[in-house]
Amino acid sequence: MKIGIINEKSDNRVAIVPDLAKRLIDEGNEIIAENGCGASALFSDKQYTEAGVKLVNRQEVLKSAELICTIVPLEADELKQLSPETVVISSFQPYNSLDKTKEIASHNLTAFSMDMIPRITLAQAMDVLSSMASIAGYKAVLMAANYLPKYFPMLTTAAGSIPPAKVLIMGAGVAGLQAIATAKRLGSVVQAFDTRAASKEEVQSLGAKFVEVEGAVDDKAAGGYAVEQTEEYKQKQREKIFEEAVKADVIITTAQLRGKAAPILITKDMVEQMKAGSVIVDIASSTGGNCELTEDNKIVVKHGVTIIGNSELAADVPNHASQLFSKNVHNFLKTFLKEGKVEIDMENEILKSSCIASKGEVLYGK
């Protein structure tokens, strides 16, 4: 199997790092990569060639690859350059728009979406969402600390004592739990909120206080995502969050609903009542944001509060993010790449869930 790697146009990560490329070659595959594909993630062309990768130009990768893996989906004009029946792996987010999936099917390509891999025990080693979310939670705290005009830890000095920063984490999934751990290491007082009852024990095990609102709908089949709540619950939630938000120095929001706009947890009124100099880092900004005043991919100051909207924080740690992404991809490839040949078993739950198009047919939603 000839596997292609390209230089991501709008991302510092690379889909397959040299170490993993070597493993794939040892397993009977050939790998071609675009010159400079790993430079932004600090992987040199020399490392790729030493791993056995053949370096070529972008057009050659697109034209020759039988399987191509990217972090950001290829644009329509590049999909046209792929040979029919090429296997394309990326994070297509088909639940947000079917246009890309239909475009892929129109070119008779087979596409697997890494964000559609089910969050089951068997697929944990392939879970790109969790890998990237962990980095995002860590990076969110560091960004908050950078913009907060205060210390995070409590300090006692000859000049007096400095109280610790108060951090509120909204959403205790993978990103939220990593944010809690990082904020605690920096010495802040941490509270966390989540609608999922199972999160309470995890939050407390990391040394944070769990902000509990009774009456939440808890769907264990939601794959780690939050689920839509009743209006009665939402009102109780707003009141409790308002009470905690106005006391916080930092709020980090991570709650997303698959295929829907992110739930508004921090309203404009709450921001207006927050302390001047406070910071909000909204990881859910790409789907509308958990804060009503968030602007995606922007840092804005509203009512004296710095609001950072960024759902791609993992791309700011490109070296380690690329390593984790590569391992996820390699583990995924093992499910259908046998001795250099593609063998897709659609009875396999992982493949059935993640294959969004095949042989000219859109499979997502069926």
Image (cartoon, rainbow, N blue to C red):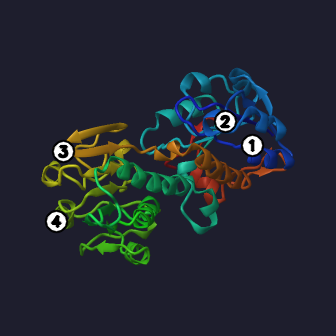
Cα distance between the residues tagged 2 and 3 = 39 Å
Cα distance between the residues tagged 1 and 4 = 49 Å
Q: Quadrant of residue 357?
A: top right
Quadrant of the rendering where the N terminus is positioned: top right
Task: Please give the name of the residue rendered at 15% of the width and 65% of the height, measured from the top-left corner.
Answer: 239
Residue 122 can be seen in this image? yes
Cα distance between the residues tagged 1 and 3 = 45 Å
Left-right relation of 88 to 246: right
User: Callout 3, which amino acid?
Assistant: Gly
- Label 2 sits on residue: 38
Pointer 2 or 3: first along the chain: 2
How many marks are shown on the rendered structure?
4
- Residue 28: x and y in percent read 86, 46
- Mark 4 Cα shell of 10 Å, populated few (<14), some (14-19), many (≥20): few
Q: Are marks 1 and 3 in contact (CB under 8 Å)?
A: no
Task: Please give the name of the residue rendered at 67% of the width and 53% of the height, measured from the top-left corner.
Answer: 327
Q: Are marks 2 and 3 in contact (CB under 8 Å)?
A: no
Pointer 1 or 4: first along the chain: 1
Task: Please give the name of the residue rendered at 33% of the width and 62% of the height, measured from the top-left corner.
Answer: 169
Q: Are marks 2 and 1 in contact (CB under 8 Å)?
A: yes
